[in-house]
Every structure is written in C-alpha cells, then in structure tokens.
Image (tube, coloured by chain):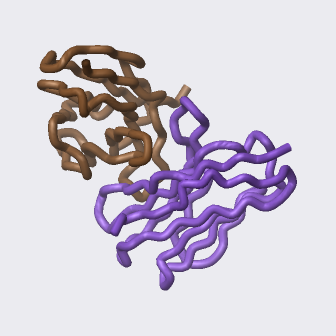
Amino acid sequence: QKEVEQNSGPLSVPEGAIASLNCTYSDRVSQSFFWYRQYSGKSPELIMSIYSNGDKEDGRFTAQLNKASQYVSLLIRDSQPSDSATYLCAVNVGNEKLTFGTGTRLTIIP
Amino acid sequence: EAQVTQNPRYLITVTGKKLTVTCSQNMNHEYMSWYRQDPGLGLRQIYYSMNVEVTDKGDVPEGYKVSRKEKRNFPLILESPSPNQTSLYFCASSLANSYNEQFFGPGTRLTVL
C-alpha cells in the first residue's frame, strides 16, 4: 500500500464551482499535512498546511483533516482558471521524511 | 529575495560521467532535501539533511550522494549516472524540519544518455 494516495485525475470543474481534492495516508503517527500546487513546468508551492483535526480556511481554500480516517482534503471555492494545476498532498510520516502523493491534475473549465 | 537556487537547470550527460547538481538557499534554513519527480510516480525524496554534517536517506537514495558542509549548500552528486536517473530534480529547504513548509528550487532537468 502506498503511503500517500491521491486520485490522479484529471478532475474537471466548471469555473465558479467547488473543487474537492482528496488524499489518504497509511501511517497513523503522521503529524503534519500539506497541500502544494504545481503548475506545469514549475516547482511546487505551498497552498495549505494543517496539523490538527478539523478545518482550516485560507481565502478560497479549506483544508480538512480527519486523523481517525487518515484522510485529508482540499476544497477550492469559486474555482478560477488560474487554479488549473496539479495538486500534491504531502505527509510527514512520523520521522523527518516527507512523502508526497502522485498528485491530482485539476482543470477549471471557463 | 528569499530563494532556493539550483544549477544547472538543464543537463544532458552520458552514462558514467560524474556530475554534481548544486543547491543553495539564503534563508538560513536548517533542513534541506532533494527530490526527483517522474511521471506517474510523483515526488520522491532522495536525501535530506537536518543540519550541517547531518544527512539521511529518503525513499530512493540508491545511486546518489549528498554532502552538507555548509548550512546554505546541499549538493547532489551522481558518481556514475545511469539512464534510469533521467528525471526532474528539485531541491527544497525549510526552517527547521519536515514539519515546516518547504520552499522548492526551480528544478533541474537531467537527461542521461
């Protein structure tokens, strides 16, 4: 079983709608969780970090963490064409390593 | 400007010819890391360093070496590159450890013929 799993997509969402991205992880001792955005040909950039159960909101982005279900999600409200990118889930798996999922490619349709 | 720099950005080489990819950060970060990114496999950690002279293996360390003699620099060394090391490589740094946000360099696209 992969340590961090994401649906590779592509996920297509109409402009203005909510995009929902999901990630599951296998290590129960994981303590920190990140969502990175990567545009084609560019390096990853941090969108959100979350460390405790519940929701964390930052502008149009909301990260949700459920440690009991080993599940972390990212919601993007009022999706814009500029949100079209690959979204990477990353999990600190209990040591100093950071493990990334393979990413979900998101396309916002104007 | 706070940044992570990598050189070279693009490199085409031949099997067995030793090469070094440099990485430098100007943010006084303790933690630095190297990743490779391959289609369908995502970002995989090669090596990381918690501080000067402290390095440890990530998930795919075979065929790579690193050193951390200075806080700001973390070069990636391929002693004898092979075609399966053709990939996009990213260096990253964070303030203290992997619990913190990582800042990524622009990437180095390596092709080994």
Q: Position of residue B32 (x, y in %)?
A: 33, 41
Q: Is residue A5 left or right of residue A9?
A: left
Q: Colour of chain A?
A: purple
Total marks in image: 0
Question: Compared to B39, does B80 lie above or below?
Answer: above
Q: Colour of chain B?
A: brown
Q: Depth check: give the residue in front, B88 or A37.
A: B88
Question: Compared to A107, does B83 lie above or below?
Answer: above
Q: Is residue A105 left or right of residue A79?
A: left
Quadrant of image for the N terminus of chain B:
top right
Q: Position of residue B82 (x, y in %)?
A: 19, 27
Q: Depth check: give the residue in front, B107 or B6.
A: B107
Residue at image x 39%, y 62%?
Answer: A92
Residue at image x 26%, y 32%?
Answer: B85
Q: Position of residue A57 (x, y in %)?
A: 71, 64
Residue B63 sits in quarter: top left
Q: Position of residue B112 (x, y in %)?
A: 26, 21
Question: Compared to B1, does A5 lie above or below?
Answer: below
Q: Depth check: give the residue in front, B83 or B23.
A: B83
Residue at image x 79%, y 42%?
Answer: A81
Residue at image x 25%, y 18%?
Answer: B113
Question: Compared to B45, does A62 lie above or below?
Answer: below
Q: Is residue A102 left or right of residue A84?
A: left
